[in-house]
Image (cartoon, rainbow, N blue to C red):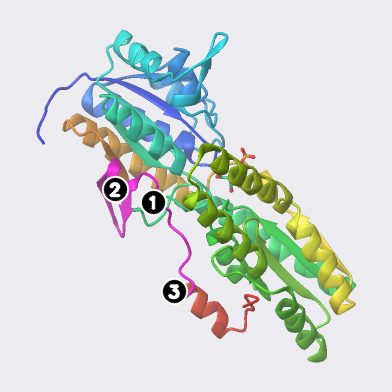
Amino acid sequence: MQDDGMGKHIGILTSGGDCPGLNAAIRGVGKAGIRAFDMQFLGFLNGFRGLAQDRTMKLESDMLSGILTDGGTILGTSRDKPHKITVGDKTKNMTDAIIDTYERHHLDALVCLGGGGTQKNALRLKEAGLKVVTLPKTIDKDVGKTDITFGFDTALGIATEAIDRVHSTATSHSRVLVVEIMGHRAGWLALESGLAGGADVVLIPEIPYQTEKVADAIRERSKAGKHFSIVAVAEGAMTVDQSNRIEELLEQKAAAMSKEEKSAVSAELSAFHEEHVSHTQKLTSDLEEITGCESRLTILGHIQRGGTPSPYDRVLATRLGTACAQFLNDGGDGYMMAVRGEEIVPVPLEEVAGVKNLVDPNGHTVRSAKLVGTCFGD
Ligand code: F6P
């Protein structure tokens, strides 16, 4: 795919939840593009919304200096979806406005840094005729077709340090410390920080659990003289009953014939997810009641997304960014730059959009944790 069209005009945006490494990635694309391929970059503010509303920030070399170690994104971000963005007082499909912006600035391509939702949005724009290249970003590590996403390693370090720290208070008070960890509907962050931090229990969405079995593990530890326990819980973890309920609702939604039926089931699903937000508080009080052991909950929340990227994420984001600039210069578009072992390879957006990278319950990391005695509540 040779195309030595040096001097291309490239748009760039960051979309979805922010994470450490975004600025390192912007810097990688921009510095490589400007220095090696004579490209010019136009940043769009606050994700796809800025693209639809034509809110820009010219990205020149001086803007890219000194941001490698900065958390967050200099462009701002949002969770807006192109086909649902409001401009003025009307809500309509804004893909046309995005195409207008793209053409008004005579862009040769658009680079989108984001997670699963961004890959789907980028495919929509590709199908609308725009040239798009994406980079996989998220602390959740749940984007399909790539080994890892930048942001994950930094969040893993933050969550692991938190688990390390709650050990001393749990032992001092002979308590059960429940630590809620982000990850949306994937369990990677809880699994790996739980293993790294020596949690006694790890609960993840991919392995529905039974509270009684968690309580048994805590009681067994007490009998062995370990009067404290650390429980690492993914925010998306569910009991077996909750998981069965979700499956039931999803089947009902798939089978629903009429629009009314579909929206009724969707409402039930939304209500379930809204109620599920506080599931770790209920788990903590249930464990205290069943085991008789004082229990406390720590919700790590957005601390896991804050601050400077880890060295690993700085290197990964830079490599993905420079690979993107090289791919653009070679005339590539319609692909995500993915991590495969030691390589960065382009994967068609059609193969990425909608594909989730979830924990394999029979995978080596889970098997390894079980071999050292970690309880998964199953
Ligand atoms: O996708 C990253 C993530 O941090 C998830 O782990 C979490 O569920 C979600 O974003 C939180 O979204 P928001 O920042 O919009 O509250």
**Image quarter for residue 90?**
top right
Mark 3 within 8 Å of ligand 1, using the beta carbon: no
> Residue at left 42%, top 20%?
43
Q: Looking at the image, is 290 positioned above or below residue 15?
A: below
Q: Looking at the image, is 283 positioned above or below residue 113?
A: below
Q: Which residue is mark 1?
A: 355
Q: Is residue 201 left or right of residue 328?
A: right
Q: Residue 148, image x and y in percent?
A: 41, 54
Question: In the rendered view of the protein, which quadrant contains the N terminus?
Answer: top left
Q: Residue 212, image x and y in percent?
A: 75, 78
Q: Which residue is mark 2?
A: 351
Q: Secondary structure at mark 2?
A: helix
CA gap between label 3 and label 2 equals 23 Å
How many marks can you see? Answer: 3
The magenta stretch is 338-363
The amino acid marked with disc number 1 is: Val
**Image quarter for residue 108?**
top left
CA gap between label 1 and label 3 equals 18 Å
Q: Is residue 138 left or right of residue 299?
A: left
Q: Quadrant of ligand 1?
A: top right
Contact, CB < 8 Å: mark 1 with mark 3? Answer: no
Q: Which residue is mark 3?
A: 363
Q: Looking at the image, is 329 positioned above or below residue 226?
A: above
